[in-house]
Image (spheres, rainbow, N blue to C red):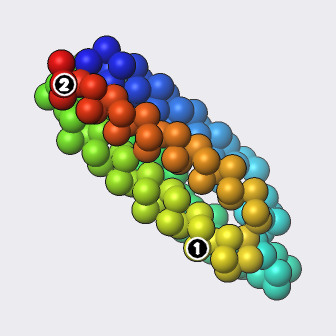
Amino acid sequence: MNKLKWWFRVVGGFYLLLTAMNFYGLFLGGAQMYTDILPAPMNADPLAGQAFADAWLVFVFEFGVLGAMALAASGDPAKNRIMAWVIIWAEVFRGVVADAIWIARGYSTSYYAFIAIHLVIIATGVMFLRQAKAE
C-alpha cells in the first residue's frame, strides 16, 4: 500500500506542478505561446492561438483537480483505489489517445515524449494497484 500512497503523492504533485506552470503560461505568458505550438496554417492566426489557450484552460483545471484529489487520496490509498483508476483512464484517453491524435493532425512529434510519460504513469499505477490488492 505504501507504493500506491507514494504514487498518489508523486502523480498529484506532478499534476499540481504542471497546473502552476500552465497557469503562468496562460495568464502571464500570453496567447502567443500557444499560437506558436499550433501546426500550420493555424500558427499564423492569433485568434487560433487564443482559442487554443482558452480550451487548454479546461485541461489545466482538470490537472489541478486531479492533482489535489490524488494528494487527498494518498491519505488512505486502500479506500481510494477508484481515484487511481480515474487517473489511469484519464492518462489513457486524455493522454495517450489525445496526443496520438494531435501528432496525426500535424502537431509536434515532441508529443511522443508526453505519451511516454503517460505510459509510465499508467503502468506504475496499474502495478501498484495490483500490489496493494495482493496485500
In the image: residue 14, left or right of residue 75: right
Q: Name the residue at the bottom extreme.
A: 41
Disc 1 crowd rating (10 Å Cα; few below 14, some 14-19, many 20+) is: few
- In the picture, the quarter occupied by the C terminus is top left
In the image: residue 119, left or right of residue 102: left
Q: In terms of depth relative to the viewer, which is nearer, 56 or 13?
A: 13
- In the picture, the quarter occupied by the N terminus is top left
Can residue 85 be seen by looking at this rendering? yes
Disc 2 crowd rating (10 Å Cα; few below 14, some 14-19, many 20+) is: few
Q: In terms of depth relative to the viewer, which is nearer, 97 or 69?
A: 97
Q: Name the residue at the right extreme.
A: 44
User: Marks 2 and 1: which is nearer the front?
Assistant: 2
In the image: residue 112, left or right of residue 94: right
Residue 132 location (% of width, % of height): 23, 24
24 w.r.t. 48: above or below:
above
Q: Which residue is drawn at 40% across and 26% down?
A: 7
Residue 52 location (% of width, % of height): 63, 70
Mark 1 falls on what kind of element? Answer: helix
Q: Name the residue at the left extreme.
A: 79
Q: Which of marks 2 and 1 is nearer the N terminus?
A: 1
114 w.r.t. 20: above or below:
below
Can residue 64 be seen by looking at this rendering? no
Q: Residue at x 76, y 63 (%)?
A: 109
Mark 2 falls on what kind of element? Answer: helix
What residue sits right under mark 1 in the picture? 101
Residue 133 location (% of width, % of height): 18, 28
Residue type indicated by callout 1 = Ile
Picture disc at residue 134: 2
Which image quadrant is residue 24 in? top right
